[in-house]
Amino acid sequence: MLYVLRRFAVLVTTLLVASFLVFLIPYVTPGDPAARILRARVGDLVQDPQTLARLRVEYGLDRPLLQQYLSWLGSALQGDLGRSFTNGTEVLPQLMRALSVTASIAVIALLLALFVAVPLGAVCAVRRGTPLDGAITGVTQAFVAVPEYWLGPVLVLVFALQLGVLPSSGWHGVESMVLPCLTVALRPMSYFTQVARSSMIEVLEAPYITAARGRGLSFAQTMLRHGLRNSVLPVLTLFAVWLAGLLGGSVVVEVIFAVPGVGRQMYDAVINNDVPLIQGGVVAVVGLAVLITTLTDVLYTAINPNARTSRVRA
Amino acid sequence: MSVLDVFGDDARRDEPGAAPPPSPSPSSAETATAPARRGRGTWPPALLAGSVLFGVIATLLLLAPWLAPYPPAQQDLVARLEGSSAAHLLGTDHLGRDVLSRLLDGGRFSLAVASVTLLICAVTGTLVGFVVARRGGWLDTVVMRVTDILLAFPEMVVALFLVAILGTGDLTLVLALTIGGWTPFCRLARGVALEINGRDFIEAAQALGCSGWFIIRRHLLPNALPPLLAHAAVRFGHKLITVGALSFLGLGVQPPFSDWGSMLSEAIPYLDRLPMLVLAPGAAIFIAALSVTLAGRGLETRRARAGRST
C-alpha cells in the first residue's frame, strides 16, 4: 500500500514539475511574456499598448509568478489549455485528435512486435544454443541499432517508390498506417524477442514444466498451457514501458511519414513557436507516460510482491 | 522507467548470470577488484568484433582531414546528384559535394557529441550514485525520486522543450542528451555500492579511517566498473542514434556544419533519384551504433562468465 501511495506521489510530482516547466516557456523566452500569453487566451496578437495594459490586468498577468501558475494550472485542469498561435483554435481538441493518431500507431506497432517476438523468443528458447537461436538472437540484437530515420526512408523506397504498393506519407486509411507501424515496430520487436527468449528459458527449467510433461501432456500442449503463459509477463511489462515512451517518442517517424500525431504536432509547434500547443503536448505526453508506467508498476506489484523489493534496489 | 531505459534493462536480463552486483565471495578484500581482472584475455566474439569495428570507424574519422578526397563543403554544381564513380566513390549530393568526404567529416560531429554527453552522464551518474548509496537517508530518497521523475520524460520531448526555451545550439543538444541520461548510471552505481557497502572490506576500510572518497575510488569504483562499462557501451549506441535523430529533425547540428543525421534529412527529397544519398549516412549511423552495442553485449557476456567462475 505504501508502495502504491509512493508511486502516485511520484506521478503527481512529475505532473506538477512538467506543468510548471511548460508554464514557464512564455516567461523565459525573449520578448514580452504578457503579449504571448494573451495571444494564447484571446486567440489573436494584441498590438495596441493600451489594450495590452488593460488585458494584462484583466487576465492577472501583473500578479506574482506563483499565483499566475496556480490559475493557469486551474484552467488547464478544466481542459482549457488556451488557443494555438498558428490556427487560433483551442488546443485541447487538436491535442486529443493527435494523441489518438499517435496512440493507434503505437498500439498497432507494439501488438505487431509482440505477435512476432513471443513465438520467435519461444523458438529460440526451445532450440537454445542451435544455429537458429544464434541467428535470431544475432539479428534482433543488430536490429536494435537500426535508426528509425533510416528504416523509414528505406521502406518508402522499397514499398512506395519501387513497388508502388503503399503510400509514402500522409494519413488516409489503413494503407498509410502500414509503413509507420512497421518502422516503429522493429526495435521493440527486437527487445521483446530477447526478453521473451530469456524468460522462456527460465520457464522451461521450472519444475511445473517437468510436472506437466510427467502428467502426459505433449510438448506442444505444455508450451501452450504453461510455457507461453508464464513467459509472457515480462514481455507485457516491457510492452507498457514502450507504450509509455512511444506516445511521445515517435516524433521522427511522424515527421518522416507526415502523420498528424502528437509528436509531429509538438515538433511543428516548436518550429513555429506555438507556445500553447507545446505546453499542451508536453504535459499530455509526459502525463500519459507516467500514468502508464505507474499503473504497470502497481499492477505488477499487485501480481508479484517480490517485485517491490527488487525494484527498490534497482 | 522510460523506453530508453530498456536498453540497459534487458541487456542485463538477457544473461541470467549477469545480475549487476558481482556475487559476494569469502575472500572479500581480494575480490574487491577481482571481477575486473578475472576473465581478461578471454574476449567473447561480440566484444572483439564490436571493438575492432569501432576502432576502425574511430580511426577513419580521426584521420578524416587526411583521408577525405575532397573538402566536405566543396560544391561542384556541374556534378550534382551523381552516382558512384572513380572520382566520387559514394557519389555527390544535391550541391555536388562528395558524399564520402562528408560522411567522414560528419561522423566526427556525431561521434564527438555522443562521446562527450556519454562521458558527462556516466561520470555524473556514477558519482551521484556512489554518494547517495554511502550517505543514504533523505538524500538517497530525494535523488531516487528525482530519477523517477526524470525517467518519465521521453528524451525527444525534453529536446523539443529545450529547443522551445533555448533555441537550437550546442548547449541545447548537450543538455537534451544529459538531463535524463545520467539516471541509469546513477541507479546502477548505487545498486553496486549498496550491495557491497555492508561487506567486511568496506567496514575494515572505515575502521582504518579511510575517507569516503578513498572508499569510493578504491573499493566501489573497481567493483562497479565492469557493469558500468558494459552499460556505457550499449548507451553509446543509443546516444549516436539520438544525436542523428535530433540532427535529422534540424534540432542538432546547425548549418554550415553537418553530421550523419542532417545529411540523411537533406537527402530525403532525392530518395527516388539517388537512394545512395540516404542509404550511406544511415548505414554509417547503423554500423557505428552496432559496433558499440556489440561491444557492450560482449562485455556483459564476459562479466557473466567471470561471475559464474567465482
Image (tube, coloured by chain):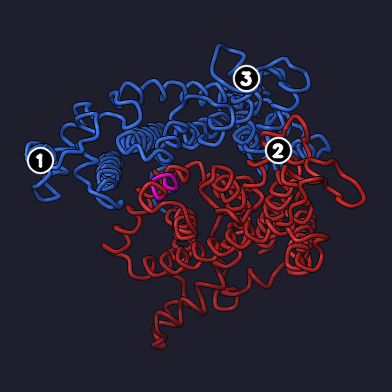
| Residue B142 place in picture, x, y as percent | 29, 58
> N-terminal of the two: label 1 or label 2?
1
Q: Quadrant of the C terminus of chain B?
A: bottom right
Q: Colour of chain A?
A: blue
Tell me which corner region of the image, top left, top right, bottom left or bottom right, holds residue B138: bottom left
Label 2's element?
helix
Q: Nearer the viewer, mark 1 or mark 2?
A: 1
| Residue A28 place in picture, x, y as percent | 28, 52
Q: CA distance from mark 1 to mark 2?
A: 64 Å
Q: Main secondary structure of the magenta part?
A: helix
Same chain letter for marks 3 and 2? yes
> Is B161 covered by the magenta stretch?
yes
Q: Amino acid at mark 1?
A: Gln
Question: Mark 2 packing: few (<14 Cα in 10 Å), some, or many (20+)?
Answer: many
Q: CA distance from mark 3 to mark 1?
A: 54 Å
Chain identity of mark 3: A
Tell me which corner region of the image, top left, top right, bottom left or bottom right, holds residue A96: top left
Who is closer to the viewer here, A2 or A56? Answer: A56
Q: Farthest top residue?
A: A173
Q: Colour of chain B?
A: red
Name the residue tied to disc 1: A50
> N-terminal of the two: label 3 or label 1?
1
Who is closer to the viewer here, A277 or B116? Answer: A277
| Residue B223 place in picture, x, y as percent | 55, 69
Q: Residue at x 75, y 51 (%)?
A: B97
Name the residue tied to disc 3: A178
Name the residue tied to disc 2: A140
The segment highlighted magenta reads B158-162
Q: Amino acid at mark 3?
A: Val
